[in-house]
C-alpha cells in the first residue's frame, strides 16, 4: 500500500560545505571542514551525511563548496557515492543565506521540497518524520531542534540553597538550531542574494507563523563537529553505540 505522505517528502538536498573550520586546525589545514574524518570510521563527515541522506530517500544532492573546494570535489569524484552529487563553488562570498540560495538554484527539481544541512553536522534521525511534520504544519521552512549536552557539570539545589545533586554534562534546557532543515519550494525565493537568512528570512517567517521547529527525538544522535574535542567526543560516543 502506497504511503500518501511519501509524495511530499524531499528527494533532493543541499549540503553547505564551504566553511573554513578554523577551530578544527590543524585538521583543516589541507582540507575543508566536511572532509575531516571522524576517528575510527575512516570516513569524512560528508561521507556520513550522504549515506544518511540516501537512507532517508534522497537521490540528488548539491554540495556547496568554498574553502579548499578542489579537495572536496576530488573526493566526491573518486568515491562511490549512494546519491547523485553536483558541486557548486561561490565565486565570491555570499554569506550563509546567499550561499544557500545559490546552491538551491542548482537543485534538479526547483518545484519540489528539499532538505539542507550544514556540512559539520553528524546526526541520525528520521528525515521522513521531519518532512511529515513540516507538511502537517504548512510551514515554508522547518528547523531541526537539538538539546546539546552542556560541556560542564551541573548542580541541583533545594529551596534553601542546599546542594542536593551533581549532574555530569546534562542536556541544555534550551533547544538550538541543529543545522538540518526542510524547505518548501517557494522558500528559495525568500532568501537574500547576499547575507544571513537567519537574520532576515527566518525572523520574517517566524512572524508569519510559517517557520516550524522539529525536536530531534530523544535518544537520536546529534553533534556539531566544530573543534578537535568534538571529534574526540564523537569517536567515543560512536564506539559506545557500536556504530
Image: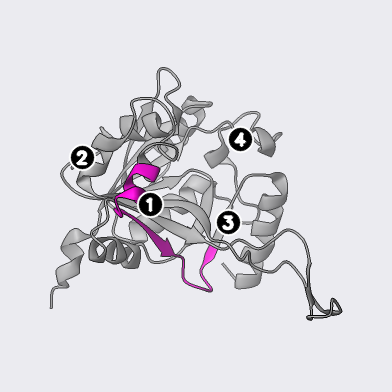
The residue at the point 86 percent across, 79 percent down is: 162
Q: Which of marks 3 and 1 is in front?
A: 1
Classify residue 9 as left or right of residue 172.
left
Q: Name the residue under label 1.
A: 181
Q: Nearer the viewer, residue 201 or 194?
A: 201
Question: Which residue corresponds to mark 2?
Answer: 108
**Mark 4 and mark 2 residues within 8 Å of each other at the beta carbon:** no
Magenta segment = 203-221
Spatial CA distance of label 3 from label 1 is 15 Å
**Of the numbered discs in the image, which one, if any, rests on residue 223?**
3
Q: Which of marks 2 and 1 is nearer the N terminus?
A: 2
Element under label 3?
strand
Q: Residue at x 61, y 35 (%)?
A: 21
Q: Pick out the residue farthest to the top.
A: 92
Q: How far apart are marks 4 and 1 (CA)?
A: 21 Å
Mark before the other along the chain sequence, 4 or 2: 4
Residue ID for mark 4? 21
At mark 1, the secondary structure is: strand
Label 4 SS: loop
CB contact under 8 Å: marks 3 and 1: no
- Could you tell me if the residues under marks 4 and 1 are in contact, i.e. CB atoms within 8 Å? no
Which label's residue is closer to the chain start, 3 or 2?
2
Residue 209 image point, x, y percent: 31, 55
- Do callouts 3 and 4 mark residues in contact (Cβ within 8 Å)? no
- Residue 135: mark in rendering: none
- Callout 1 crowding tier (Cα within 10 Å): few <14, some 14–19, many ≥20: many
Category of crowding for the residue at label 3, using alpha-carbon neighbours closer than 10 angstroms: few (below 14), some (14–19), many (at least 20): many
User: Residue 114, position in %: x, y?
Assistant: 28, 49
Q: Where is residue 230? Give x, y as percent.
A: 67, 51
Amino acid at each position: 500500500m502506497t504511503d500518501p505522505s511519501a509524495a511530499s517528502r524531499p528527494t533532493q538536498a543541499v549540503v553547505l560545505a564551504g566553511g573554513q573550520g578554523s577551530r578544527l586546525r590543524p585538521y583543516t589545514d589541507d582540507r575543508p571542514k566536511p572532509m575531516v574524518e571522524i576517528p575510527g570510521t575512516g570516513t569524512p563527515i560528508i561521507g556520513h551525511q550522504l549515506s544518511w541522506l540516501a537512507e532517508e530517500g534522497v537521490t540528488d544532492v548539491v554540495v556547496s563548496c568554498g574553502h579548499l573546494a578542489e579537495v572536496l570535489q576530488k573526493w566526491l569524484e573518486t568515491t562511490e557515492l549512494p546519491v547523485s552529487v553536483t558541486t557548486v563553488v561561490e565565486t565570491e562570498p555570499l554569506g550563509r543565506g546567499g550561499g544557500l540560495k545559490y546552491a538551491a538554484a542548482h537543485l534538479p527539481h526547483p518545484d519540489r521540497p528539499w532538505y539542507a544541512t550544514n556540512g559539520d553536522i553528524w546526526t541520525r534521525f528520521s528525515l521522513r518524520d521531519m518532512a511529515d511534520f513540516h507538511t502537517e504544519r504548512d510551514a515554508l521552512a522547518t528547523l531541526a531542534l537539538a538539546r546539546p549536552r552542556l560541556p560542564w557539570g551541573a548542580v541541583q539545589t533545594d529551596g534553601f540553597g542546599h546542594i542536593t545533586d551533581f549532574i555530569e554534562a546534562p542536556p541544555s534546557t534550551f533547544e538550538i538550531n541543529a543545522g538540518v532543515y526542510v524547505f518548501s519550494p517557494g522558500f528559495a525565493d525568500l532568501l537574500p542574494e547576499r547575507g544571513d537568512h537567519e537574520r532576515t528570512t527566518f525572523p520574517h517567517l517566524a512572524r508569519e507563523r510559517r517557520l516550524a521547529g522539529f525536536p530531534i527525538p530523544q535518544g537520536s544522535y546529534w553533534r556539531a563537529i566544530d573543534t578537535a574535542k568534538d571529534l574526540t567526543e564523537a569517536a567515543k560516543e560512536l564506539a559506545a553505540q557500536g556504530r
